[in-house]
Each structure stands twice: as C-alpha cells, then as structure tokens.
Image (tube, rainbow, N blue to C red):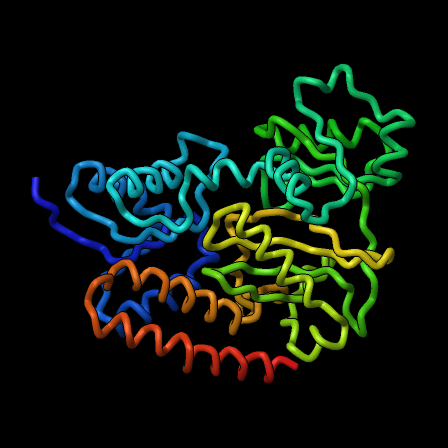
C-alpha cells in the first residue's frame, strides 16, 4: 500500500501543557513549508494504526512524553515504530529507556567522575534484608532523600527520610520502579537572591542554564554576567559530560552548588523536560526559553528533512552562526 501522507515533523505527547510548545513548532513548520502533526491523546491510537499500516510516514518525531517504563504505552510504541521505519526520533526510544533509569545511570556517572551526592541504590527485591543502619547513616546522613530509579514529575521523591519507612513510602507511590536511590541531602548556597540550584536544558548541543527554586519551582534565566560573577562555568562542562554519556539530543538535569562549595548533579537525565510556559503557569519556564528550545529542535529536525538540498544546508548553517546566536545573546541580556 502506498503511503498517503508524509509528515516532516510530528510531536507526540498525551499532555495538554505542551500546547504552547506545539503551536510554536507548527508556526515554524508553516513558515518553512514543512508538513506537521501534533499527536496527542485524542489522535495517538488512529495515528499509530495508520503508521503501522503504512498509510502515513513520519520523517522526524519529537517524542516529548513517552512512558518509557510501560511497554504498552501507545506513545512509546509510536516512537519505536517510527524508528523501525527509519524515521528520525528525538530521542532514540531504546537509548532513552536505558539512560533515564537513575540506578543504572548513577553508576555510569560515578565511573566517569561526574559529581553526584553520596548514594545507595536499593533494589525492590532487597527491601526485606535492607535496613537504615549506622553504616547507611554514615554514608547518606540524616535526613536523606529517596528517589525512584524509574519515575518523573517528583513521583515517589521523599526529601526528609529518617528511616526505612521513607523507602517504603517512595516504593508505594512509584510502584513501577524496580530500584530506589537513598541520597545525601544537598543544601544550596545563596548566590545573590537565588538559591544555587539550577535546572539546565541540553538541546541539540546547546546548554541553557536556569535558576530553579526546588520549593517554589520558579525559573529565571542565568545571565552570562552571573556565570562570570558566581564562577558557574562548570555547569556547562558537567552538562556536556552528561550529554556525551547519555547520547541524548534533549534533556534537562538539575545541579546544586552545595554549601560545601561543590557542584552535585542531583537529577540526572529528564528525557521529558518541563515545557510549561510562564505566560500560562506562574512557575513555568520563561517563554523565551521555550521558544528557543523549539527553534533548536526545529533546526535539527529540518536538517534531516532537507538533507541534501544544497543551498538550504548552507543557509541554515549561516543562520545558526549569525542570527540565532545574536538572538540568544539579546535574550540573555534582556533577562539580566
């Protein structure tokens, strides 16, 4: 059966809070003459069926919120099917399923000397024999933090653990997780008016640093002058190191500058980075950050769609080196 529809770029997510992101992507596709589809919960079953029947084709899929812990999730199946049909998926679903497991990736970070808090990984099957004894307290302190190895959006995270009860609480909330991390509590310094807790976006080779308050969840862009003033250059180095290990195009992570003067990576690879815009949510991501992320993902996707068309490739490279960089610097300056 011949393919009836070809979509240059498709976005897949079940969540309505990606509407702002999706509409910005649709605008760019319209401006550049690319075909586009937003696969949400309403359309995913029909879209997946047509894809499997070769009634449509996806050249680039931006997989924003696939449930990597659930093999039966339709968005996960969609990402794998696009990849099977030789489409370009950001990010590769098989790779994502591996690196977002905090227990696995914690050891990868340790082996490659990426700074992380002292951590003990406990498998669910070992709960009966594990106890928060003197040795555990010596390593992770009191209170400690408990995080599920599988999970996101804060589900199952306990920040005030004192006993094994905290482990059971996390396990009950994150019932699909096979392992849990007991982690030393980190206490951020104050740098000016900001707690030194950072959420950083890695998008197609570029690092976008934001101040992020772990209590209010409010964002503010980190300006170039703040990077120099507070000596935050290591943030980009750490994130780029994580990206090399994860082999990911898009993710966010969290890094804290502790009161002991050291940086610690406290959240490793969030493959579904927050895209809630501040214009819609009081604690959302600055709109200019969301727009910039859309542009970076769009240009990466466009390389695939327009590959081999000669003059276009040259124009795109010029845009990246000139207009795009100038726009980024202007945005950073306005945010100071």
Work out which quarter of the rendered image holds the C terminus and state it: bottom right
Quadrant hosting residue 223? bottom right
Outermost residue on the front side: it is 112
Q: Residue at x 21, y 63 (%)?
A: 308
Tell me if I can see residue 20 in this picture: no
- Between residue 212 and residue 101, name the one nearer to us: 101
- Residue 208 vertical position relative to residue 239 in the rendered view, above or below: below
What count of labels does the image hold?
A: 0
Outermost residue on the left side: it is 1
- Residue 94 vertical position relative to residue 21 in the rendered view, above or below: above
Q: Residue at x 81, y 27 (%)?
A: 164
Q: Residue at x 82, y 37 (%)?
A: 161
- Between residue 9 and residue 306, name the one nearer to us: 306
318 sits left or right of 202 in the view:
left
Quadrant hosting residue 213? bottom right
Q: Position of residue 284 (x, y in %)?
A: 59, 64
Q: Position of residue 57 (x, y in %)?
A: 20, 48
312 sits left or right of 288 in the view:
left
276 sits left or right of 308 in the view:
right
Q: Position of residue 131 (x, y in %)?
A: 82, 22
Tell me if I can see residue 77 in this picture: yes
Q: Residue at x 35, y 42 (%)?
A: 79
Outermost residue on the top side: it is 129
Q: Position of residue 62 (x, y in %)?
A: 38, 53
Work out which quarter of the rendered image holds the N terminus and state it: top left
């Amino acid at each position: 059966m011949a393919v009836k529809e070809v979509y240059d770029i498709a976005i897949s997510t079940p969540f309505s809070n990606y509407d702002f992101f999706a509409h910005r992507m649709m605008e760019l596709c319209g401006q550049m003459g690319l075909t586009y589809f937003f696969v949400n919960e309403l359309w995913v079953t029909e879209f997946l069926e047509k894809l499997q029947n070769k009634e449509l084709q996806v050249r680039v899929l931006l997989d924003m919120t696939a449930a990597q812990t659930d093999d039966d999730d339709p968005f996960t199946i969609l990402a794998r099917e696009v990849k099977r049909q030789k489409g370009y998926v950001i990010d590769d679903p098989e790779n994502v399923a591996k690196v977002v497991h905090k227990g696995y990736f914690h050891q990868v970070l340790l082996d490659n000397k990426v700074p992380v808090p002292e951590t003990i990984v406990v498998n669910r099957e070992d709960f009966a024999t594990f106890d928060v004894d003197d040795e555990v307290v010596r390593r992770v302190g009191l209170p400690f933090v408990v995080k599920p190895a599988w999970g996101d959006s804060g589900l199952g995270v306990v920040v005030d653990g004192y006993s094994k009860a905290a482990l059971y609480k996390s396990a009950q909330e994150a019932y699909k997780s096979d392992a849990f991390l007991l982690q030393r509590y980190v206490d951020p310094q104050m740098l000016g008016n900001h707690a030194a807790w950072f959420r950083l976006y890695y998008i197609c080779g570029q690092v976008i640093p934001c101040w992020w308050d772990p209590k209010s969840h409010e964002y503010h862009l980190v300006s170039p002058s703040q990077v120099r003033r507070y000596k935050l250059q290591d943030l980009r180095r750490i994130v780029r190191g994580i990206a090399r290990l994860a082999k990911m195009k898009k993710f966010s992570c969290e890094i804290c500058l502790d009161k002991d003067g050291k940086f610690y990576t406290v959240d490793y690879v969030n493959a579904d980075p927050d895209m809630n815009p501040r214009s819609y949510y009081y604690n959302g991501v600055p709109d200019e950050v969301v727009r910039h992320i859309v542009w970076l993902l769009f240009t990466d996707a466009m390389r695939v769609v327009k590959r081999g068309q000669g003059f276009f490739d040259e124009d795109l490279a010029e845009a990246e080196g000139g207009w795009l960089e100038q726009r980024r610097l202007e945005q950073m300056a306005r945010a100071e």
